[in-house]
Amino acid sequence: MNTNIPAKLINDKFMEKIASNDLNKAAEVATDFTRLTLREEGLLRKILPPQTITAAELDKQLDTDEPVKIIDKEVSQPLSMSVGFATLPKNRIMKGDRYRVDFARILSPSYFQDVRRLEQYDYDIRNVFKENAIKDHMTAEDVPFFAAVDAIVGNTGNAASSVTGKVQYYDFSTSNNPLGSAVNFDRNSIVEATKILSKGYTPGPNALGKDSTPIRLNTDLILMNANTGREYLKLQHSNIGDLSTDLFKNGLSATTILGHKHLFTMKDDVIPDGVAYYFAAPQFLGKFYELEQPTMFVDRRAFMVEFFIYSSIGASIGNPYGVAKAKFF
């Protein structure tokens, strides 16, 4: 897309499509712009890149008429062991688990306006959709996803998750954290938080199963808001070496810090200050599908024009061990 095209010319072409009742073409023009902006800004879309599927790839269910897709999980199997000679192995039925991805439709507000009034704007009127409808879409995707993450790790820091039986939420502001004393955003707490996903799994009192097979994952992405991220700028050279100088000179432009990819967001209403989330790579985490990509609907009735954006998506965390959370302050 040529971003140097004057906004007035874009509006004129857009209005020509509406005036000629070529509404499909008018929708296509805005759909391209909308889809690119949404993919760029959505947090969920950067954690789990979406895959486009068709209705033919869905799986019918007995309990609902809503769109559903069933995903297979990697099998969990016990370790080999040392035995005496003339000892046969125990039989184990080969069986794998599955999880479902439920879909929902997301709608932006519906905007109405007189065609004559729309012709008077000298700026790109599609910015209305970028600033409003697109933000609504991003929020509608991100908020329930992080609610699901919080439900997995639990609301109480330094305690076993009721879902996995593993401690996946470290609260360093309390004295019962893994470091044994109330600390803040320092080198020790930063490093300790990156260990959550890589530690082996041992069933706790709240574990759902008794399989003690180790589950070890690498932290692929660390997400925090920009306010929390700027705490890195306070770390001295004696703490993190030359990275301290680079961060102080360039700010949060670095996407990899201490060997881990970082994502900084301004959406502090979704990601609170002092909190960081840790995610395994997408193939170890879950699925995000688009049944309908964000699409702009345009309709004209006499001199009034209506437009809104809709999509149909589904996302699920198939591996609850692939998420973690840390609170530093």
Image: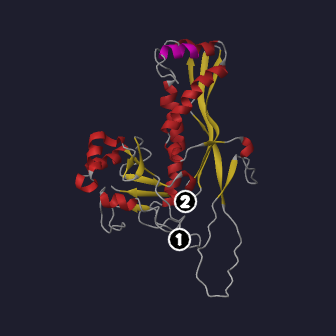
- 297 is within the stretch colored magenta: no
Q: Which mark is residue 45?
A: none
At which x and y percent is residue 45? 53, 43
Write the start and end of the magenta stretch as one range: 6-14
Mark 1 or 2: in front is 2
Point out residue 286 in the picture as x, y percentages from the top left corner. 58, 53
Residue holding disc 1: 206
- The residue beneath circle 2 is 320
> Which type of secondary structure does the marked residue at label 2 adopt?
helix
Q: Quadrant of the C terminus?
A: bottom left
Q: CA distance from mark 1 to mark 2?
A: 14 Å
Residue at (53, 17) in percent of width and height? 10
> Residue 184 in the image: x percent, y percent?
30, 58
Residue 102 seen in the current view: yes
Q: Amino acid at mark 1?
A: Asn
Q: What secondary structure characterizes most of the magenta part?
A: helix
**Compared to 34, does 231 lie above or below?**
below
Q: Residue at x 62, y 20 (%)?
A: 26
**165 sits to left or right of 99:** left
- Amino acid type, mark 2: Pro
